[in-house]
Image: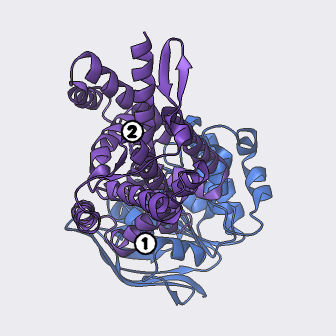
Amino acid sequence: MEIFITLFITGFGLGALYFLVASGLSLIYGLMGVLNFAHGAFLTAGAYATWYFTTSIRADGSLSSYVISLFIAGVVGALFAVATEQILIKYLYDRHIDQALVTVGLGFVATSAYLGWFGSDPLIVLPPTQLYNTVQIGDAFVGIDRFLYIGVAALVLIANFLMMRYTRIGLIIRAGVENRSMVTALGIDVRKAFTFVFFIGGFAAGLGGALATTYASGVGPTLGDAFLIYAFITVVIGGMGSVPGTAIAAIVVGTTQVLVNYYVQGLGDFVVVMLLALVLLVRPQGLLGKVAH
Amino acid sequence: MTKALTLADVNVTIKGSHILQGVNFEVEAGVVTGLLGRNGVGKSTTLRSIVGLVPRVGSIKLFEQEISGLKTHEVIRAGVAFVPEDREIFSTLTVLENLKLAERDKNPDYDTVYNLFPELLKRKSQRAGTLSGGQQQMVAVARALLNKTKLLLVDEPTKGLAPKLVTEVADALEVAAQATTILLVEQNLPLIKRIAKNIIVMDQGVVVHSGVPTELENPEFAKQMLGVSGGSH
């Protein structure tokens, strides 16, 4: 039982990281119809920002330095995302194939740039000592970092909910996911919402990148690519444009992957893909997804 | 006559189909003008071209201001309100959220909206997707009436509605007409006769006639222009 508990919470933590990447992807697709294959590059940028900050600017190994690095990683991811939207994507709205090709290209370029700047070997990021502690649940000892991932993802989910429910920009995003042309027909410049969604999506991805350095014990040029694949699976299962759906799917994908990998010897990835196929067959719009007009 | 709207040689091509083939007409300010024609002749596309929801070429002037180069949200902010066919309300938002989204003025006119449609006040917290067709139409019209506008474009507001609701919508349009110019696409000829001062008839992507609603009393005219017998549709 203790193994199950450890694996379950580890999978839950992994799902939290998937959520941080996938929530932005989901909103960007839901609102704008943009399949952003460069989203993993935002995560990797955040991860390298964390590495740089915690090894070159405040290398004291303290918890406060780590927390600051999380915020900086989010900002770096957000700025990268906004630059991507302003320099590339905004000229290609309603040209979905071109958008996909451009973001795929940007993803390749970013990975090559990281490779050139930082080398192919993973750079070690040492988290503060507090994150090496464990928490006892029953007979199981679970790494406290798992709860950090879950806590941060929960905060992002709550902040997202409050923003969507109680702010005008949230109202515009919710309406835009449902019928973007009608939002413009009410006199709203929906492109400002597009930029904002890239900002918050990039922030969450950068934050996810910072946490991923702890999960993966470092950062390499392809860190974001590895997460991006599962983030896309999460978005499709949860439903494009639905952040709550993405949260549920992230937990399902993360826990399924980790549990099956352990109990059925490495078949976790295969089962996740089968799960995706099942959802597409039974409910093509995903768990909580709606189709934008 | 003050012209609220002038279209000159407006063309729209969508997916290779030449839908509007040089549309020309003028809309008199301060009155209701009916835009009529058989199904599929380009009436809805004309309204959508005015607000920029479809790519268009040609000249569109709103009170002498050229708006054909503006994006949709800029056309709306220039003083146009649009009630689309099939309502296009946001079904996952509440009634109040639908209205709030449409707010542009500093003091949106909720008093007029709730006086015309008291049902909306009662149901302001209800998800718009769970409303009846008639109530959804009220939301669609109410969104357009919240702000002061120079021109109101309304596309088949009574389509599929029960007679009582048709009367309510007609009442609302009459109230709106006291403060703005209305271009109304409508198949319901009694409604046109009741509230319109002018009519424009389209066929196959062009305007074929401009006149007055009393011409609809002539069965020959109605049959020739609209393919109907002149009463209701």
**Marked residue chain, label 1:** B
Q: CA distance from mark 2 to mark 1?
A: 30 Å
Query: Helix, strand, or loop for circle 1?
Result: loop
Q: Which amino acid is tagged 1?
A: Gly
In the picture, the quarter occupied by the N terminus of chain A is top left
Q: Quadrant of residue A10?
A: top left
Q: Residue at x 27, y 45 (%)?
A: A226
Residue B97 x/y as whole percent: 65, 49
The residue lying furthest to the top in this view is A1
Same chain for labels 2 and 1? Say yes or no: no
Residue A28 x/y as whole percent: 41, 54
Which class describes the residues within 10 Å of circle 1: few (<14), some (14-19), or many (20+)?
many
Q: What colour has chain A?
A: purple
Residue B124 x/y as whole percent: 71, 42
Q: Residue at x 78, y 66 (%)?
A: B107
Residue B137 horizontal side relative to residue B51, left or right: right
Q: Is residue A198 visible?
A: no
- Residue at image mark 1: B52
Q: Tell whether label 1 touches label 2 (CB within 8 Å).
A: no
Residue A5 x/y as whole percent: 45, 17
Which residue is more in the foreground, B22 or B120? B120
Residue B175 horizontal side relative to residue B92, left or right: right
Q: Is residue B196 visible?
A: yes
Look at the picture and state if A278 lies above or below B225: above
- Residue at image mark 2: A239
Q: Residue at x 51, y 58 (%)?
A: A59
Of all chains in the rendering, the one displayed in blue is: B
Disc number lying in front (2 or 1): 2
Query: Helix, strand, or loop for circle 2?
Result: loop
**Marked residue chain, label 2:** A
Q: Which amino acid is tagged 2?
A: Gly
Q: Of the numbered discs in the image, which one, if any, rests on residue A230?
A: none
